[in-house]
Amino acid sequence: MKQLIFLIALATLACANRESKLEQNEPIKPCACDGRPFFKVLKIQQVPNSNFINIFFGACEAYQVKWEVVKDGKVLVTGIVKPTTSAVGAYLGSLSEGNYIARLSGVNCSGKSEIPFQFRPIEEKKSLSQQSQIAYDSYPNFFDNVPVETQTDTYSPEKFPTTQIALSPDSLMGGMPTPAFAVIFDKPIDVFQKKGIDHRTRGIYVSLVHPEYRPCNERYPNIQYEAPCKDGTGKEISYEDFISTIEPTRRGFFAYPPKGNSAEGEQYFLTQPEQKLYEAGLDYHGSFGRGDAVGGKAQVMFQTMDTEMNISNGPDNKSKNKYMAFLKGMGDAITGYVLAMYSNTFPGVGNFQAGRYPKNKNEYSSIAQNPIWTEAGDNGLIKGWRLTDNRRIVEAEEVSCLAEDGYEQGMTLKTKEGRVLRNINHFGSNANVEHALAKIIHITETGAYRAHLDGRKYCSQAKIIADRNPPYNNTSGGFWYNDHAQYDPQGFGAYLPRHLAFMEGMMVFFSGTDIWNIWDRAKPGLNQDPYNGILGALTYLGTKIKTSTGSYSMLDLRPNLQFMLWESEISYDGGRTWQQHKGTDFKANPQALPLRIAYTKEGKIAIFACRPYNTEAQSCQWRVKINNRWVTGQITEKDWKSCYPAQTGRKDFYLKME
């Protein structure tokens, strides 16, 4: 039977490389293998210590499959997936113990099969989304009890209340509960560990960097310098048999491409055949072992691939096909999400590009788009295959800054001797530094919007550490200038300040982003107070507010939120005229107020506004049209909150949910 399943898996994988017949508008024909009708459910296997089942089946041409769990003729759980192996995963945590029928049917080709099975649910740990939590009448200021850090290399998760990570069924994960807005940390969680705090109780779902994980317990050892694992009899445990003690949805890791980001790495991609690159992608599993693999895939929730070479932006069809084959292998290797860093639909290297905003709803006329994300493959196993055929492959778009981008407007830069050099200006044609928040809004909301046009998720890698490549010679460490007293040449020597880190997190959410990868590799000895800004944003997003129909957080509402983005409407003259601001407008006009609106069709509304450089308007009106009815509101000078408890008069942000 194992051999049969393996052979069927290979056949299914080969056929899955073809374009869906639905997408080609071809007639629906019987699912077949070598021209002979074949569609059969082979077996049901409950994943150990979980409420997740795998439905193994055979059907070479079944590229898109509908699955149903049935009892007494009634469909209890269902979903549609595009499998890339011969197994479909289904989460049955809502069902009681008993006998059921698993039914599969082809969507792109006709075929149906079912098999009885027994399901015995396990008692799951109380999820973070089920924990009791205070519901507030309106948002308090969670920064009031969080003074600015005076010590380096630390921040204060213990001073923020517990944050709920709202989970909902994810159709791309077989119905498994996952966050609709997932925050992942590309940084060691040493501060959380030292303070005895689970990072998921403060809104961070997965940590990608975890050197503290114990070998042969949480992770498989690096056998080049660590002892191999052994079972109770002294026999060595192979990577294929090892099972991490970390639950699958908490597993994540960071990786570089084969041969690294180098000239050698670029040549490797350009010279290897697509099949070889696909196999290279299959090798990326993380350090969690494959003993509990599902349908041949290692159970990993998030993995990142840091490819900083021209190959990832598809400058021609040759490199396009090479990198697509590699990503396909990565997507076929794990059960979760592949985050392709630095490979984006708009390959603009994190710069302002006016063409990122569509001419119409889905028409772009003045910007180049990366064929890796917009076209089908041309050769071999990826011929006719698109990245959208595995929607768990996600672009992760960096937004980076330089240290001076976070300085206050008008700040005077001086030499160490006190000689005046220049005044900081973030605005207009005479700007001498960037507008950090304008760039974050501009890139993130246009990137998420474009991905969603294809039915893809989008990951923002908006950073709070200043690590952008400096534009001038003799400058390093993420600084614009090397001549002022604050300049630190020793590498990545500054973060955005607390209030900008907070505003960044809120605007990433209001952009409609699905995943936020908080990346940094800070050197020791830095003030990490900006992480309190991030924790503040995650706290507000997870805080429940009482409404007429119940208590909700913005994370609760996220699956149903409609984001107005650059169509959010604001009036500065009492409602006589209304404006809509793109991200570029906030850089052009120092009075333009960054404001974004999201709503549900049932009438719930969330509004966030902020003043990143203390020049923006303090009073305005906002409005949004829901079901042909205008809803309006007002922001006055008294409605603002400060991010700094020692500076209560600051007017940093406004947040409301109704």
Image (tube, rainbow, N blue to C red):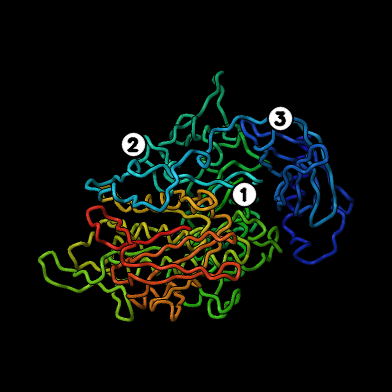
Q: Viewed as shown, does residue 19 lie left or right of 436?
A: right
Residue at 49% from the left image edge and 46% from the top image edge: 165
**Residue 318 appears in the figure:** no
Q: Earlier in the sequence, mark 1 or mark 2?
A: 1
Towards the viewer: 527 or 562: 562
Residue at 50% from the left image edge and 51% from the top image edge: 555
The Cα–Cα distance between marks 1 and 2, rounded to whole angstroms, is: 32 Å
Query: For the residue marked with disc 3, what is the amino acid?
Result: Glu
Q: Secondary structure at mark 2?
A: loop
Q: Are marks 3 and 1 in contact (CB under 8 Å)?
A: no
From the top left corner, tell me how far across and down residue 397 is, in percent: 48, 62
Q: Secondary structure at mark 3?
A: loop
Residue of label 2: 195
Q: Earlier in the sequence, mark 2 or mark 3?
A: 3
Q: Secondary structure at mark 1?
A: strand
- Nearer to us of marks 3 and 1 is 3
The outermost residue toward the left is 417
In the drawing, what numbered circle is on residue 97?
A: 3
In the drawing, what numbered circle is on residue 170?
A: 1
